[in-house]
């Protein structure tokens, strides 16, 4: 099993920046991709960004060019640098670890990001 712990959320004004961090522990050898999802009130949880073991990345259209995902394999940590934030980015952000070894994925408990106008 993999456990995930997020940090770095909070409140910021529109146009500001935040960096989220997520540390993975447990069976990290089984992780094939790390990512971030978000869920706005009354909406479905959606993928924001993902990074594979080879460093390949993908982003939701709504954040492309503003958000950057990266990982430090030595620290088993994935980051999400969020720039030029807007109120529409307000959501609970969830770290995600996908494992082809286990055939599924796990989520962290989530962290709140609030952007005021």
Image (tube, rainbow, N blue to C red):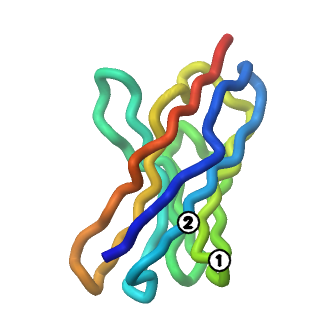
Question: Is residue 65 something that shows in the picture?
Answer: no
Label 2 sits on residue: 23
Q: Is residue 17 left or right of residue 76?
A: right
Q: Is residue 86 left or right of residue 47?
A: right
Q: x and y percent of residue 111 in the render?
A: 50, 40
Label 1 sits on residue: 75
- Using a 10 Å C-alpha cutoff, classify the residue at mark 2 as few (fewer than 14 neighbours), some (14 to 19) or many (20 or more): some
Quadrant in the picture for residue 107: bottom left
Discs 1, 2 touching: Cβ within 8 Å:
yes
| Residue lying at the far right of the rendered structure | 16
- Quarter containing the N terminus: bottom left
The foreground one among 18 and 86 is: 18
Q: x and y percent of residue 69 in the render?
A: 63, 59
Q: In percent of the image, x 64 and y 59: which residue is there?
A: 79
Tell me which label, 1 or 2, sits earlier in the chain.
2
- Where 57 sits versus 10, above or below? below
Q: In percent of the image, x 40 and y 28: which residue is there?
A: 40
In terms of secondary structure, where does tag 2 sit? strand
The foreground one among 97 and 68 is: 97
The foreground one among 28 and 117 is: 28
Q: Is residue 115 left or right of residue 37?
A: right
Q: Is residue 79 left or right of residue 83?
A: left
Q: x and y percent of residue 48 in the render?
A: 48, 47
Quadrant in the picture for residue 4: bottom left
In terms of secondary structure, where does tag 1 sit? helix
Q: In percent of the image, x 53 and y 26: which residue is there?
A: 90
- Using a 10 Å C-alpha cutoff, classify the residue at mark 1 as few (fewer than 14 neighbours), some (14 to 19) or many (20 or more): few
Question: Is residue 25 something that shows in the picture?
Answer: yes
């Amino acid at each position: 099993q993999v456990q995930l712990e997020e940090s770095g959320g909070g409140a910021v004004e529109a146009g500001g920046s935040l960096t989220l961090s997520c540390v993975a522990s447990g069976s990290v050898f089984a992780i094939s991709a790390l990512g971030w999802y978000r869920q706005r009130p009354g909406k479905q949880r959606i993928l924001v960004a993902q990074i594979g073991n080879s460093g390949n990345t993908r982003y939701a259209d709504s954040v492309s060019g503003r958000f950057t995902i990266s990982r430090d394999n030595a620290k088993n940590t994935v980051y999400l640098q969020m720039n030029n934030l807007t109120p529409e980015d307000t959501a609970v952000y969830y770290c995600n670890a996908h494992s082809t070894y286990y055939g599924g994925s796990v989520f962290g408990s989530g962290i709140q990001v609030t952007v005021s106008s």
